[in-house]
Amino acid sequence: MDIISRGAIKVGTVVSAKAKKTVVIKIDRVKYISKYKRYAREHSKIHAHVPDNIEVKVGDIVRVGETRKLSKTKSWIITELITSA
């Protein structure tokens, strides 16, 4: 089943799956700092909704898509499980 998202699509790692139908995903990226002519690693954590047809656990790599605001902190939904932990 394809899940529709309407904005950005990102790939991240599940770091917490304690809440019901919600997971916390860590997204790593590399940013170039022109002043020092070097790269720096950054990360951010987002909360994402877990649909009923997808089972995820800590350590899984997932693809998430932006969607409408689902709660105060959730505006992402898991669209695909890429690799299982």
Image: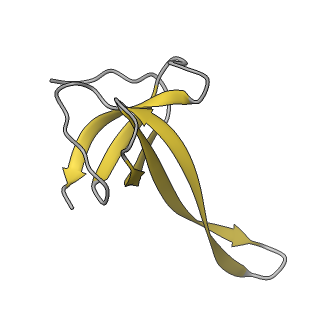
Q: Quadrant of residue 38?
A: bottom right
| Residue sitting at the far right | 35
Q: Position of residue 73 (x, y in %)?
A: 59, 30
Marker count (numbered): 0
The residue closer to the viewer here, 3 or 58, is 58
Q: What colouring does the structure picture have?
A: secondary structure
Q: Is residue 17 above or below residue 68?
A: below
Image height check: is 3 above or below 44?
above
Foreground pick, 57 / 38: 57
x, y (%) of residue 17?
Answer: 36, 45
Answer with left or right where residue 48 lies relative to residue 56. Answer: right
Whether residue 77 is situated above or below residue 70 in the rendered picture: below
Residue appearing at x 38%, y 39% in the figure:
64
Give the x, y percent position of residue 85.
Answer: 21, 62
Residue at (30% x, 60% y) in the render? 59
Q: Is residue 38 left or right of residue 43?
A: right
In this view, the residue in front, 43 or 49, is 49
For residue 65, above or below residue 52: below
Looking at the image, which residue is at 55% across and 20% down? Answer: 71
The quadrant the N terminus occupies is top left
Residue 26 place in picture, x, y as percent:
48, 55
Q: Residue at x 55, y 18 (%)?
A: 69
Name the residue nearer the viewer: 23 or 61: 23
